[in-house]
Amino acid sequence: MILASLPRKISQARLGISILLICAAVPAMAGAPGPARSTPAVATPGQLAPNAPFTTVNGKVVQLDAYKGRPLIVWQVTTWCPSCAAGLRTFADHQAQIDRSDLTVLVLRDYDNGGYPGPGMRDFAKSVAAPLLKDPHFVFGEDTQALFERYNPGKFVDIYQVIAADGRVQLASSSPSATFGKIEAILQPRP
């Protein structure tokens, strides 16, 4: 029985290796940069947060570097995601606490909204936590592809990074409704 299945297992292994080799070759054949080139920095804890642009709900293009010197959360959401709506309600529940700090929360709709249709960011925020749209500690907008690739290479629908005032990524997590204690631990009242 084992010997009878051996040729099939060898064929499957050859097929798997062939697929891996083809997948490795296709980007190079398509003119994509090969592994020798450097890739853009990715936002990981302990490293300097990479700069990237995003677009506010008012259409203004802003660079993340504009927030240097103060703590920042870059939270990427999809507007069809129930945990994202729950996370926004959690931020609204803690609005007074956040307003007493120097923290700015960027709430950005994922580039291409996670591949599914859904309301625009302004409509999403209005329907879930409208008062946050007028709060200066909250900025709503849309990811650019560059920001999405640097801050969400895993293409998660609900992910955030906390960036300290020194520009280093302090924390990467997801689902603020379930992990707000991590955010609360870094909140410092304004002096």
Image (cartoon, helix red, strand yellow):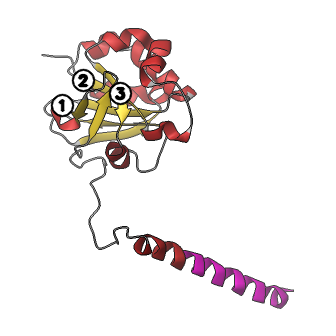
Residue 111, by quadrant, is: top left
Q: Secondary structure at mark 3?
A: strand
For the residues marked 2 and 1, what is the alpha-carbon distance in whole angstroms? Answer: 10 Å
Sequence order check, earlier mark of 1 and 3: 1
Determine whether, in the image, residue 117 is placed left or right of residue 55. right
Which contiguous range is marked in magenta? 1-20
Please state which amino acid type lies under the numbered disc 1: Tyr
Q: Looking at the image, do the residues carrying marks 3 and 2 touch, with CB atoms under 8 Å apart?
A: no
For the residues marked 3 and 2, what is the alpha-carbon distance in whole angstroms? Answer: 17 Å
Considering only vertical position in the picture, is 156 above or below 177?
below
Q: Nearer the viewer, mark 1 or mark 3?
A: 3
Please state which amino acid type lies under the numbered disc 2: Leu
Q: Which residue is mark 1?
A: 67
Q: Nearer the viewer, residue 10 or 107?
A: 107
For the residues marked 1 and 3, what is the alpha-carbon distance in whole angstroms? Answer: 15 Å
Q: Position of residue 10 (x, y in %)?
A: 70, 86
Sequence order check, earlier mark of 2 and 1: 1
- Which residue is found at the position 49% from the left and 32% from the top? 78
